[in-house]
Image: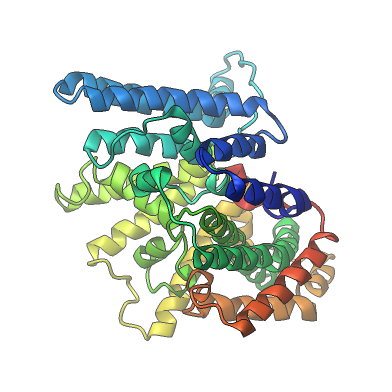
Amino acid sequence: MVFSSHIFIFYFLPLVLLIYYVLPARRNLFLLIVSYIFYGWTDPRLVLLMFATTYINYVCGNIIYRAEGDPIRRKRALVVSVAASLALLGFFKYFGFLEINLNYLLDTIGAPLIPVLQIALPAGISFYTFHCISYTVDIYRGEAAPVRRLSDFACFVALYPQLIAGPIIRYHTIAEQLVSRKHTFEKFSSGTALFILGFAKKVLIANELGHVADAAFGAETPTMIDAWFGVTAYAFQIYFDFSAYSDMAVGLGRMIGFEFMRNFDGPYRSESITEFWRRWHISLSTFLRDYLYKPIGGNRLGPRRTYINLAIVMLLGGLWHGANWTFVVWGAYHGALLAWERWMGKESFYARMPRPMRIACTFVLVLFSWVLFRSETISEAVNYFAAMFGFLPHASGTPLLAAFLYSPATLCMMLLCAVLVLNPVQAFDWVNKLTWPRVALLLVLFTYSLANLFVQSFNPFLYFQF
């Protein structure tokens, strides 16, 4: 089930909110049940996998907490928790990738190939795996106590607003809210407003720009201008798509009393790649910083080790997004840029340019990375880079592509996106002060978005694949 569907908006959400606020107690248990229904809507078997991960980490968390005077037992329980979680993630997400690459090596040396298993990737497994890991690690570090009930921990892992595509919620930031949380009209109102804004961004902007990006990346030989236009459209698409999901998740959380962290903060206004990663997918970048970068040494072991640690973190961050060499190169690219800027004192090589130029240069560097992120293979990415620099011959269908890309509606949409991404006031801030004119605007946006939803084909969020 997805947020931007008529089943969720007209049936699931109203019914859940109605029952939730009528219940006098055990609301977490109710949220757990509806979250399992939400997650297992298309394939109930996936709930069993998530529950297995949940139960293992719940047991390990209790062992870690109770064995306070036994450091060896505590460490063993932590290792079992992390290893089991990553093993399940690794099998479902990377086993097929390893088999394909092993077959490539076997074919190179003339050895017989092995059959490749077709393993379906469970939706959201990358996110709920990190949620489980944060639980045992936070208990091990003494930053939080374990939950008293298995149902409460299962509710944290499966909570439907952030289950499929985040934000990545760390246990210690939400532990107290699992026990007791405030439900106010102001919180519910801001949550509803944030959900509507995210819904509008997804339906009215991201889905429409997806057709533009698909046309450019699907063309055999786009012109240089078409290629740059297409990757810019994809940059806007993935931002408005993913930030839309995050806005809707935070909004849904507020409706039931939870407060999740902000996941985006105007990333395309960044003046360096270092700043970009402080503003883009904040829950992932801070998770990798606190649960991976710092534990392996961070910047405490000298400059050379710092650069190596940055490279390791970004390579693993790339792999976390998907089992594909394009994601590996994408992570290596960002790791190299971050290491370069760290060497220069966290400044870009264009730091002395005027601020608009710094923002523009950073955006171009990010566009190069989006080519890797969007392409299915390295060769596709290379061909698209060749098109961006004018190295591909023009095909006979190029005028038809241009007619589609540069229609008045598309140009207006691209201009609107440029204005929105450069606006310092984000949706997360805009909903903090709801006036009657803003409420009227929200009603218009929601109505128009719903009307568009019924004429669009099914278009799930981009980050569902991760």
Residue at the front extreme, as displayed: 24
Q: Quadrant of the C terminus?
A: top right
Position of 165 compared to 82: left or right? right
Question: Considering depth in this image, is 55 or 394 the residue closer to the camera?
Answer: 55
**Colour scheme employed for the rendering of this structure:** rainbow
Closer to the camera in the image, 24 or 337: 24
Residue extending furthest toward the top: 112
Please name the residue shown 16% across and 23% down the image: 71
Give me the residue at 28% from left, 35% from top.
139
In the picture shown, does residue 375 fall above or below 171?
below
Q: How many marks?
A: 0
Q: Nearer the viewer, residue 164 or 253?
A: 253
- Side of 78 where 183 appears, left or right: right
- Residue 406, image x, y percentages: 76, 77
Q: Position of residue 275 (x, y in %)?
A: 36, 67
Q: Quick check: can you spot residue 324?
A: no
